[in-house]
């Protein structure tokens, strides 16, 4: 039947292989038992799906199972983005199941469980769901299925968060690549309503995503970058289910997620006077740390993964929470990644400042003292014992190359901060093989090359 594992973003597998009718039934029953045991049959269940092949089929199958067990089910009447379903879970005080594999290859599909707090399910929750697999679920008569357009209440909520009057007055022209994903139609509807002109790429829903990864990474946005350079417009993109974002500046340059986080932290705290803390992962950039420290904004640092960011957002009054891989959310919104909101916040930041994205990037670099470069190098080792030994050596090290280590962070792997105040190294284990992922950030390529060589020599 295939093993079912629920991680941070749910269970994912290849469609019509391990992701099949039987396993979807098993997973749905396990989620149903979790909801019954923790909330009772009266808890509504929302179900959504992205454009992936058979996502709608499996969503309807799950809806029937939940209904037959005795739940009141609200099934999306169309393709929907993950942040929309997450917000709806909060709005309706419901639990939700989203059929998506996010930015995974097109042959994959997945089930993501979203509790009523509207953020990623914690390890405790997913462990209980997995423990429920193949356990008996008692059925109770009276369930039903309603078909719902979840976009409506989400758009109303977004209009309370974003100053669209400012955006409309700025008379923007933007370029957008939907990557054939779930966010495209909704994002462009919002732009149209608020008088933002745009050009479109890959807006149709395609379960195969054009044969590519629906991931808004720089390597997949070559045409969008060229269009922005040609037109001088801002560019945006989202991943397959709309929870991640990408921004291209007016010069056709890719804006890193860390830069977006810094720009929006400044915008929200300075322009909109939002008070609170910054939540970021340990893999996040020193650039964001330096800006926050200079502006007396407290930093809450978490392990890598948005489930940790979301948890910290629920426990603190925050300005913004984000991660280096293109996910963020803000005060007054859900503790879940929202790529649609991120794109709109960049438009709002530009409208308030009356500066281009390129200029806002330069402002941040000037305020923190340099432009940061981030690179990753994978160190392949023979076995897990060598991985453990390598991490132990790093934890005991006092120098890397010619740099002294001034601080160590063991929140997730080990992060080393060096004495030039702009260089850091994060080393984390791969979850699937004897591999160390080595991330280095600094103000020059030359330094990074030097650091990678020194780390490689130390751990092998």
Image: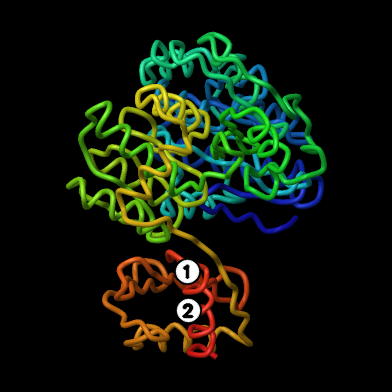
Q: At which x and y percent is residue 152?
A: 52, 12
Q: Is the C terminus in the top left, top right, bottom left or bottom right quadrant?
A: bottom right
Quarter residue 65 falls in: top right
Q: Nearer the viewer, residue 263 or 277?
A: 263
| Above or below, 86 relative to 375 | above
At 49% across and 68% down in the image, what residue appears? Answer: 439
Q: Nearer the viewer, residue 439 or 403?
A: 403
| Above or below, 387 relative to 369 | below
| Residue 68 in view in this figure | no
Quarter residue 377 falls in: bottom right
Element at label 1: strand
Q: Earlier in the sequence, mark 2 or mark 1?
A: 1
User: In this figure, which residue is indicated by the disc labeled 2?
Assistant: 451
Q: At which x and y percent is residue 139?
A: 56, 31
Q: At which x and y percent is residue 148?
A: 58, 14
At 73% across and 31% down in the image, what residue appears? Answer: 180
Say the numbered circle drawn on residue 440. 1
> Pointer 2 and pointer 1: residues touching (CB < 8 Å)?
yes
């Amino acid at each position: 039947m295939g093993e079912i594992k629920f991680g941070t973003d749910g269970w994912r597998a290849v469609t019509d292989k391990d992701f099949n009718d039987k396993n979807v039934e098993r997973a749905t029953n396990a989620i149903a038992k979790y909801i019954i045991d923790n909330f009772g049959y009266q808890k509504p269940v929302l179900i959504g799906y992205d454009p992936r092949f058979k996502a709608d089929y499996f969503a309807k199958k799950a809806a029937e199972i939940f209904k037959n067990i005795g739940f009141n089910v609200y099934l999306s009447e169309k393709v929907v983005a993950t942040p929309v379903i997450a917000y709806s879970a909060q709005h309706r005080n419901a639990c939700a199941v989203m059929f998506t594999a996010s930015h995974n290859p097109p042959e994959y599909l997945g089930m993501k469980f979203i509790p009523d707090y509207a953020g990623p399910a914690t390890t405790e929750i997913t462990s209980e769901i997995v423990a429920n697999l193949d356990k008996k679920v008692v059925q109770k008569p009276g369930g039903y299925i309603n078909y719902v357009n979840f976009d409506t209440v989400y758009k109303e909520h977004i209009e309370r968060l974003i100053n669209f009057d400012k955006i409309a007055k700025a008379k923007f022209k933007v370029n957008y690549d939907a990557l054939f994903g779930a966010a495209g139609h909704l994002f462009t509807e919002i732009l149209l309503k608020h008088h933002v002109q745009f050009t479109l790429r890959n807006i149709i829903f395609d379960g195969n995503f054009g044969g590519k990864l629906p991931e808004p990474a720089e390597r997949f946005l070559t045409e969008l970058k060229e269009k922005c350079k040609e037109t001088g417009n801002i560019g945006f993109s989202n991943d397959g289910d709309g929870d991640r974002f990408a921004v291209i500046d007016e010069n056709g340059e890719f804006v890193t997620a860390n830069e977006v986080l810094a720009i929006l932290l400044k915008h929200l705290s300075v322009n909109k006077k939002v008070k609170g803390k910054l939540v970021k992962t340990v893999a996040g950039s020193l650039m964001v740390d330096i800006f926050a420290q200079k502006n007396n904004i407290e930093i809450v640092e978490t392990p890598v993964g948005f489930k940790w960011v979301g948890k910290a957002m629920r426990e603190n009054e925050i300005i913004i929470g984000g991660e280096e891989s293109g996910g963020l959310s803000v005060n007054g919104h859900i503790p879940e990644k929202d790529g649609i909101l991120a794109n709109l916040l960049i438009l709002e930041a530009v409208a308030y400042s009356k500066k281009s994205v390129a200029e806002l990037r330069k402002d941040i670099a000037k305020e923190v003292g340099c432009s940061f470069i981030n690179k990753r190098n994978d160190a392949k080792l023979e076995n897990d014992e060598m991985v453990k030994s390598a991490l132990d050596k790093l934890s005991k090290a006092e120098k890397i190359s010619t740099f002294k280590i001034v601080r160590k962070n063991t929140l997730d792997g080990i992060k080393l901060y060096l004495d030039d105040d702009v260089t850091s190294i994060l080393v984390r284990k791969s979850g699937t093989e004897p591999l160390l992922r080595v991330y280095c950030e600094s103000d020059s390529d030359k330094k990074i090359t030097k650091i990678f060589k020194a780390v490689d020599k130390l751990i092998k």
